[in-house]
Amino acid sequence: MNFETYPFEKLNRLLENVIPNGDYSPLSLTIGEPQFETPQFILDALNAHAPLLNKYPKTAGESVLREGMLTYLKDRFGLVLENAQIIPTFGTREVLFNFPQFLLHDVEEPLMVFPNPFYQIYEGAAKASRANVIYLNLNESNGFQPEVDESVLAEANLVILNSPNNPTSSVMGLEEMKRWVKLALKHEFVLLNDECYADLYLDEPVPSMLNASIEAGNENFKNILVINSISKRSSAPGLRSGFIAGDAEILKAYMVYRTYVGCASSLPLQEAAAVAWADQKHVDGFREKYRKNFEIAKEILGIEAPEATFYIWLKVEDEIAFTVRLYEAYNLKVIPGSFLGREGEGKGYVRLALVYEADKTREALQRVASLREKLGIRN
């Protein structure tokens, strides 16, 4: 299989012969990895259950983890799900890669539809599934919202949406989500929403596609699935805890498939993840950190905060030249938007991940502002 080089590898190649300014300490706003300490109560649960390493975990996930996830869905979204409607997973990246292969295996000429720019695992899954791809281009002209072409959707087998979105930070409202649910039922495609940033709202809580499904009268979630992860909400990417939830009929068959994949999380990790999923208070503290970071961004860059996520999709004139100059002059790394998109989408933008404490965030954004001023870039 001929996979595209990952964006971070492309960045390394772009900058490999560039000498950064040693007057500045190195900083990176490239990867969406929270740099905050994992809460102590999660660490305590991990340590307390370390002796369970001598046991094999269940592929289906232990009951304590499932209960924690179901508690999360009820407390956060008001959703009351049954066990058959959720599967714990080893983070969400593995699901995004192997679920399309499971779903599309018996389809002769599969078609996947997903946003552009995108999280690159979507593309890798399409290649591994032998699927043709139609992009939902996200750009300034459409407000970074996926536009509907029903002639395309009529042929689609799997549509992946990503709201709140990485990298553009756009968020779909409940009415737009309901429209997508109805389209999935009308055209009989599976709709999967990647909701890994849903807890990083800055003001009002954003809904789940499962909320939209119920509002649209699809209470059994036919054709509707969501994935979510603990990594962003709990500053615990190392726990590798995620889930896929929704249509029980699809999940029943997918669960059989997963017994062969071998992605079960160890018991200590499951125990720690269970307490993290079940608790909402600690997430409030992280949201406050991100809110502060976006206040700093507005002060320094003059941009408005998004509804959710910790990304800034910053408009620049030439994203490649800007990235190189920023590293060379200020020892700061960012991701060029064109590394995250295809067919020209993402050009003219860089993605900044505001994942540090306020002092480092301020320092990094001041470097960005200095370069923008030198280049005469305005909002």
Image (cartoon, helix red, strand yellow):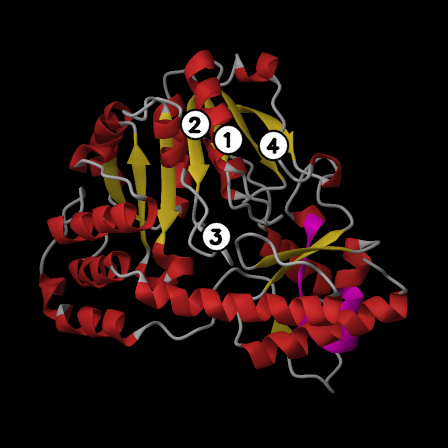
State how far apart marks 2 and 4 are (Cα): 13 Å
Q: Nearer the viewer, mark 4 or mark 1?
A: 1
Q: Residues within 10 Å of mark 4 (few under 14, many from 20)?
A: many
The reply to whether callout 3 and callout 2 are in contact (CB within 8 Å) is no
Image disc number at residue 175? 1
Residue 237 falls inside the magenta stretch = no
Query: What is the distance, in whole Å, between disc 1 and disc 3 at their CAs?
Result: 16 Å
The residue identified by callout 3 is 204
- Tell me whether the residue at label 4 lies in contact with that at label 1, contact meaning CB atoms closer than 8 angstroms: no
Quadrant of the rendered structure where residue 210 is?
top left
Mark 3 vs mark 4, CA separation in Å: 22 Å
Residues marked 1 and 2 touching at CB (< 8 Å): no
Percent coordinates x, y for residue 80 in the rendering: 23, 39
Label 2 amino acid? Leu
Q: Residues within 10 Å of mark 1 (few under 14, many from 20)?
A: few
The mark nearer the N terminus, 3 or 4, is 4
- Which three-letter amino acid code belongs to the residue tagged 4? Pro
Question: Which span is picked out in magenta?
Answer: 324-337
Q: Quadrant of residue 249?
A: top left
Q: Position of residue 104 (x, y in %)?
A: 40, 22
Q: CA distance from mark 4 to mark 1?
A: 14 Å
Cβ atoms at labels 1 and 3 below 8 Å apart: no
Q: Amino acid at mark 1?
A: Glu
Residue 17 shows in the view: no
Q: Quick one: SS at disc 3?
A: loop
Q: Which mark is residue 191?
A: 2
For the residues labelled 1 and 2, the Cα–Cα distance comes to: 16 Å
Dot 1 or dot 2: first in sequence order is 1
* Amino acid residing under circle 3: Glu
Residue of label 4: 146
Residue drawn at point x = 60 percent, y = 54 percent: 306
